[in-house]
Amino acid sequence: MSIGEKGRKMLGPLEPLAVDIYRKPFIDLESVARTLASVCTPARVAEIGCGEGVLATELNRAWPDAEIVGIDITPQPGRLYRGDPQAATFRSCSADKLAASDSAGFDLVLMCDVLHHVPPPMRAGIVVAARTLVADAGLLAIKDWEQRRDLATAAAYASDRFITGDRIKYFARDELVGLVAPDASDDAELILDAHIPPRRNNLLFIWRITRPQRLAEERA
Ligand SMILES: C[S@@+](CC[C@H](N)C(=O)[O-])C[C@H]1O[C@@H](n2cnc3c(N)ncnc32)[C@H](O)[C@@H]1O
């Protein structure tokens, strides 16, 4: 059990406040939701690596009518979700599993601060699975931390590494944006390249995923 897991158990009802205090110096999750809402109004949203559901709460606030599906590899995802219970469901499963059981597709598939927790050789696979979850002409959004020679990166590393126990590896900007490129089955057009406060290290990229051939076949 990581230091973070032990500490959280001890905090009990104070856990949501502690999570807020711990994340705030690094990322403004409300701003993530606001930025996403400035480019889309999805009916169905999948959040891969939703953790305790803190960002899902902000997503519900941004789009009260949207259906949110949060997944994580942890046993109890969405534990701290405080939005409308009717709007969100949480599952402990991989993105591959969700893709196998949900063929309708999502208007928005989001990964926020997940990929730097994933070992580098597995990252491309998760991005491919996330991409297959996106409905035609839907959006794929990835927010992650850019490695810089700055104090914020050192502090983020210390808290991520020692609180979660994961072997963290942050991204160079090009490496992150390069994870999503046009491929044989669909096109990925980068439609947003933004920084999320309070740190320049917070990169948010949004791609529109289209499958021209399949769309053409469906229209014919
Ligand atoms: C820093 S938390 C981010 C939680 C949430 N997205 C947010 O921004 O508040 C990273 C989460 O990614 C999850 N995660 C790591 N690897 C994953 C994988 N392969 N598939 C799904 N979730 C994963 C972890 O369990 C953890 O809950």
Image (cartoon, helix red, strand yellow):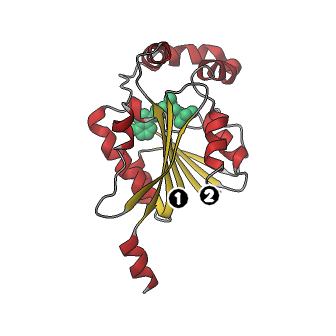
Query: Amino acid type of disc 2?
Result: Pro
Number of other residues with Cα within 10 Å of mark 2, as a class: few under 14, some 14 to 19, many 20 or more: some
The residue depicted at 43 percent of the width and 80 percent of the height is: 218
Residue 99 placement, left or right of 104: left
Q: Is residue 45 above or below residue 135?
A: above
Q: Which mark is residue 106?
A: 1
Q: Whole-percent x and y of residue 189? A: 43, 56
The residue tagged 2 is 42
Q: Residue 108 versus residue 181: which sits nearer the camera?
A: 181
Q: Whole-percent x and y of residue 171? A: 37, 30
Q: Whole-percent x and y of residue 32? A: 61, 38
Q: Is disc 2 in contact with disc 1, using a CB cutoff of under 8 Å?
A: yes
Q: Residue 19 versus residue 219: which sits nearer the camera?
A: 219
Q: Is residue 26 above or below residue 90?
A: above
Q: Residue 111 versus residue 216: which sits nearer the camera?
A: 216
Query: Amino acid type of disc 1?
Result: Phe
